[in-house]
Image (cartoon, rainbow, N blue to C red):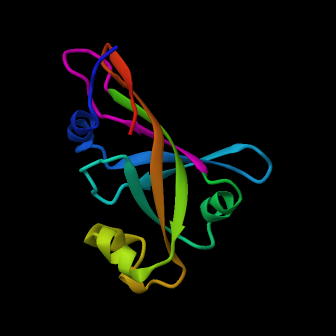
Amino acid sequence: MSKMTLADLSKKMRDIDFCMLLTRTEGGYIAGRPMSNNGQVEYDGDSFFFTDDSTRTVGDLERDRKIGLSFQGSKGLVGKPPLFISIEGEAELIRDKARFEEHWTPDVERWFKDGVDTPGLVLIKVHATRIHYWDGEDSGEITP
């Protein structure tokens, strides 16, 4: 087992923009969808994602705040597998325009044309409770 720190992991995550965000559905199934981390590359145990209030994601999180995130790097060194990260956490649904502005980047306008004024905009904050990673032949767990 490695002794990677949260700061070490943050540096390695800089090139990963999208992850799979996993929630538990009303029927008890697992639903996953790709989400952008909005270019937030200084990972400190919290992740932020924008979505629309009418999505299944919001409905799922209103019933069950437990959430999973799965990240995968694009390449490994010299034939090794790439970086994989599994994060378990609890979600918070934020509907505060001032908080939207803290995490807004112009790239998000691709999905939300009216920016932070987009009707029904919601910010999902995921606070990690467990982080597990596999980096080539090295693996470990980080307590946030």
Above or below, 16 against 52 in this view is above
Question: What residue is shown at x 32% (from left), y 49% (from top)?
Answer: 17
Above or below, 105 against 36 in this view is below
Whole-percent x and y of residue 137?
32, 13
Question: What residue is shown at x 48% (from left), y 45% (from top)?
Answer: 20
Q: Which residues are magenta?
A: 66-82
**Between 50 and 64, which is closer to the camera in this rendering?**
64
- Quadrant of the rendered image containing residue 12: top left
Q: From the image, which quarter does the C terminus lie in?
A: top left
Q: Is residue 86 magenta?
A: no
Whole-percent x and y of residue 31?
64, 47
Question: What residue is shown at x 40% (from left), y 39% (from top)?
Answer: 71
Judged left or right of residue 67, residue 102 is left
- Quadrant of the rendered image containing residue 84: top left
**Direction front: furthest residue:** 143
Above or below, 53 against 129 in this view is below
Whole-percent x and y of residue 122?
50, 72
Judged left or right of residue 56, residue 83 is left
Q: Is residue 85 visible?
A: yes
Whole-percent x and y of residue 13?
27, 40
